[in-house]
Amino acid sequence: MPIFDFECRQCGNEFEKLVLKTTAPVPECSACQSADVVKKVSAPGFRLTGSGWYETDFKTGKKKNLANGQGESGN
């Protein structure tokens, strides 16, 4: 479920909120209950590392299969 970062323009409070739909209305400020809140752009809270589909599926050329030390030709 997506957790978004928000900032209140009234009091400057920054808070996170679980929002079930990206089209859902922006929540009220958790500190002052103002409706003058904007969604902030933020990075995800996790990073996928190691070997797996995400490491090899989207790489091209010699960058493929770096996890096992092989290039595109399968050396």
Image (tube, grey):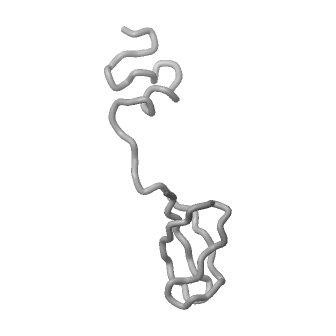
Q: Residue at x 47, y 55 (%)?
A: 44
Q: Is residue 50 left or right of residue 32?
A: left
Number of residue marks: 0
Name of the residue lying farthest toward the front: 20
Q: Is residue 65 left or right of residue 60?
A: left
Frontmost residue, 34 versus 64: 34
Location of residue 41 in the rendering, given as x and y in whole percent from the top left corner: 57, 62
Q: Residue at x 52, y 61 (%)?
A: 42
Location of residue 13 in the rendering, given as x and y in whole percent from the top left corner: 51, 83
Q: Residue at x 40, y 47 (%)?
A: 47
Frontmost residue, 28 versus 8: 28
Location of residue 12 in the rendering, given as x and y in whole percent from the top left corner: 54, 84
Location of residue 35 in the rendering, given as x and y in whole percent from the top left corner: 65, 84
Q: Is residue 58 left or right of residue 47?
A: right
Q: Is residue 60 above or below residue 11?
A: above
Q: Residue at x 52, y 19 (%)?
A: 61
Q: Is residue 24 above or below residue 31?
A: above
Q: Is residue 60 left or right of residue 66?
A: right
Q: Quadrant of the C terminus?
A: top left
Frontmost residue, 40 versus 33: 33
